[in-house]
Image: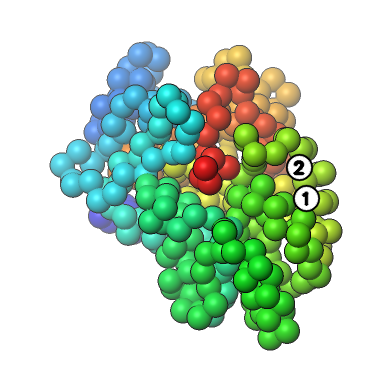
Amino acid sequence: MTNLSKQIFSISTPEDFEKISLEVFRHQAKNCQVYRDYISHLKISPSEIHAVDQIPYLPIGFFKTHPILSNVDAAIEITFSSSGTTGMSQSKHLVTDLSLYDQSFNLAFEQFYGSVKGTCFLALLPSYSAREGSSLIYMVDALIRDSQHPDSGYFLHNHDELYHKLMQLKSQGQQTILIGVTYALLDFIEKYPIDFPELVVMETGGMKGKRKEMVREELHEILQKGFGVPAIHSEYGMTELLSQAYSLGLGIFNCPAWMKVSLRDTNDPLSPPANNKTGGINVIDLANVNSCAFIATQDLGRIFPDGSFEVLGRFDNADIRGCNLLVQ
């Protein structure tokens, strides 16, 4: 799969995406036992799949109960695990080639935000040593390190220092990204409201168990006012994926070239939604070449004509888990 792995990050056209997606599907339908069994249970023959929109999606819950591997002979380099409350089963993503994740988040970041080197990254998140196994913290840790900026770092428990750091970076005209769980961002601006229009504020999740839930419009309005920014950015990723989509505002996400979102009917997971506008979110993440690239998530969403999408919520029976539970 080495050659195919290289092709994934060279995708530049819909035709490239279609061709490589079908190659990855054929490989995983043969080599990923859980996915193979699932397809068989659906009475689908892989030989009859000739287009991306025919590919079946593996329910994301299998990552909680089974090892999802398409490269079974390779050693596990790292296991990413989801956050969860006591007694809740965790998703586990067994990663046999960590370089795929490194390439994925670096290339995606550069696509949406420019060079990592020289950007200052400030995190209202726990460090990797405090939340080992988090794919988000692994990514942020790498971005902080690779930025080579002396002021990059974690500030979850030091809001006073963060405030003065932000004021210093503003005065220097430094490109700065503040990334954090939503309630930590709210906690910060309640005591330290600032006016830093050039700051990129990126929220990574909600605040289950910490604060009352708010609709996105209300939440972003509060954050925009508190930071003095024109828009709030967001990251859409999860333990079970090795790629992220990004929103530069208004909660509208775009994917890198090797990732694509589609919708399924909430009552019939093998069919598109009746109105073709809202439904359960399916994700193709070709960076998951060594696990499963075709995932039926527990998120509900809407897709726009240009391929961008909006996350509307979760299925009622979906477990509470994700980046918003990183900070305990």
Residue 87 in the image, given as x and y percentages of width and height: 43, 24
Q: Is residue 233 visible?
A: no
Residue type beneath disc 2: Arg
Is 277 drawn above or below residue 188 in the view shown?
above
Q: Which residue occupies the extreme bottom position in the image?
A: 172
Residue bearing mark 1: 220
Q: Secondary structure at mark 2?
A: helix
Residue 19 in the image, given as x and y percentages of width and height: 42, 45
Report the side of 221 relative to 198 (left or right): right
Disc on res. 86 = none
Question: Residue at left 34%, top 24%?
Answer: 65
Report the side of 66 relative to 171 (left or right): left
Q: Is residue 238 visible?
A: yes
The number of numbered discs placed on residues in the rendered structure image is 2
Q: Nearer the viewer, residue 186 or 28?
A: 186
Residue 140 in the image, given as x and y percentages of width and height: 48, 60
Q: Which residue occupies the extreme left position in the image?
A: 73
Q: Quadrant of residue 173?
A: bottom right
Question: Residue at left 83%, top 51%?
Answer: 221
Q: How is the image coloured?
A: rainbow
Is 195 drawn above or below residue 242 in the view shown?
below
Residue type beneath disc 1: His
Question: Residue at left 81%, top 70%?
Answer: 195
Q: Nearer the viewer, residue 131 or 64?
A: 131
Q: Nearer the viewer, residue 299 or 255?
A: 299
Q: What whole-number distance in Å separates the C-alpha atoms at marks 1 and 2?
A: 6 Å
Q: Secondary structure at mark 1?
A: helix
Q: Is mark 1 in CB contact (under 8 Å) with mark 2?
A: yes
Residue bearing mark 2: 216
Q: Residues within 10 Å of mark 2 (few under 14, many from 20)?
A: some
Q: Residues within 10 Å of mark 1 (few under 14, many from 20)?
A: many
Residue 83 in the image, given as x and y percentages of width and height: 46, 38
